[in-house]
Image (tube, grey):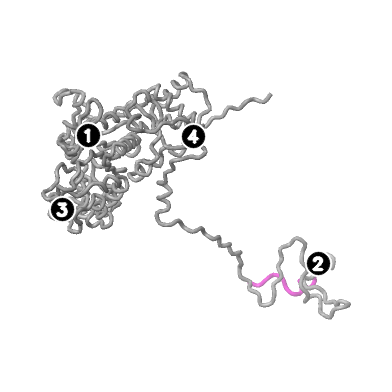
Amino acid sequence: MASSWCWNCLSRLRPLSRALTAPSATPRISSAPFHSTAVQYAQPAKKKGGSLTVMKHRQSTSLRRKKKKVTERSRPPAVGERKALRKRIVLSNPNALEVEGMLDLSPETMVDSRLRGTVLGLPVPMIDRLRAVQAFKPKQGWSIFRRPGTVLRRDTIEMGRLFEQISGEGDNAQKGKVVKKIVTGMKGSGKTVHLLQAMTMAFLKNWAVVAIPDARDLVSGGTAYAAIEGSNPTQYVQPNATSALLSRTVDANRELLASLKVSQKHPNLKMLKPNSTLEDLAKLGFTDPAVSWAVFQALWTELTATAPAEGLEKNFQPRPPMLVTVDGLAHWMTESAYRSADYKLIHAHDLSFVNHFLSLLKDGDSLKNGGLLLYSTSSSNNPNPEGFKIALDRLAARRAGISPSSPEYPHLSAYSDADPRVLDLFQSAEKSLELQTLSGLTREETRGFMEYFARSGLLREIINDQWVSEKWSLSGGGVIGELEKLGRRVRGTVSASK
């Protein structure tokens, strides 16, 4: 479509004045007095405070970003360093005050009822042996005192007298007696420390000590395992775990094992030299894990022997009583994390290592030379299997004189999934097995325990009957774990300035 404007019309328009028109974008060409270059070819002047950049000849116009400074990363920790730091145990605090007149746990003090409620120090020669059997735990409050000590409570005195009876000492001596107990109690009641006290007493009495510091390690699937050929039902051996137990046993009982000679015949161990000591026998197991299970069986046969084999009567010596401890028994009352060739979960009772220690609970003289079995439960880390819980309730009911036909006797519910193997195990051990429940400290024991905190410099308060009753109530009736939390809070008295 043609425009209605023509060239003649456009030429008649009145031109605008020069003042109203915009200035030209091209500057006028003028010459500088001392320069021959035209002004239009000169670089534009920089504005003050502006961000205009001058491009150099053949300079890239792409986007540029500042490179981040590469920070040097620290060296990662070595293999096993974090686990060692997590499980590190400190038994001394040089900043704590030294308690004057502190007595040690000894064969005399562990049965003295006059010292009830007193904190006794662990003998210094026993510290390394207790470390070897892993009696100390990282979360216990050993690092806040000058030296490790333990309170002498009523259960400790009763256990000390029991050691005397089995060793053939005291008025009610019952040499060769076998006592089997399961130690239970609420969280923080001192079950693990009770096992530590038992180990210390056993070392003082020159007993042989075999300890399982954590039952969970044997069923958590963290160690190698293999099926035993010809076993029906199929049993599984754990060579590395058995080798580690032999190593701990030798370190803790070295003097005892070195003084005893081999008195039984072991055809499966052809590498065993004649006239070897039990220490030499145990060393075969942790130097070669492949034969560790056979070595452990041979060592157990030697420690429980009552008479020498034919032809080995020359160097036979009577075997001492034994102390066997297991911490965290509930982990053995359910299926483990291991799997069979059919990819089915293996029950903990099918592990030969676990089955050996569980068979000691059954009725009969499992320890032929006498001894003590102490298996404790754990409240902080407990799988809580229903079969184990019902078995303990039934055991307590039978000890209280309740008949299985009584309505008060614990029965399975209609939809209970209790493990029958666990119930059968405790059914076969009902005559000899005892249940020991640890409760809180009494007020007198609480006073002695808190006075130890004050003498160590942790408490700066006046300890009287009213203060002890208050802390005893706050701790749930003298639960020793809660008392420790209350005692380690440092409080200083601030005097007001006048």
The residue lying at 42 percent from left, 28 percent from top is 449
Q: Mark 2 = which residue?
A: 21
Q: Mark 4 = which residue?
A: 98
> Are there few (<14), some (14-19), or many (20+) residues within 10 Å of tag 3?
some
Q: Which residues are magenta?
A: 1-14
CB atoms of marks 1 and 2 within 8 Å: no
Q: Mark 3 = which residue?
A: 266
The percent position of residue 380, horizontal first and vertical second, equals 35, 37
Q: Answer with left or right where residue 90 lies relative to residue 322.
A: right
Label 3 or label 2, whichever lies nearer to me, is 3
Q: Answer with left or right where residue 416 lies relative to residue 211.
A: left
In this orientation, does residue 163 appear?
A: yes
Q: Main secondary structure of the magenta part?
A: loop
Label 4 sits on a secondary structure element that is: loop
Q: Compute the Cα span from label 1 to label 3.
A: 29 Å
CB atoms of marks 3 and 2 within 8 Å: no
Label 3 sits on a secondary structure element that is: loop
The residue lying at 44 percent from left, 31 percent from top is 102
> What amino acid is labelled 3 in the image?
His
- Of mark 1 and mark 2, the one earlier in the sequence is 2
Q: Compute the Cα span from label 1 to label 2.
A: 114 Å
Q: Mark 1 = which residue?
A: 180
Task: Check if residue 9 falls in the magenta segment.
Answer: yes
- What is the quadrant of the N terminus in the image? bottom right
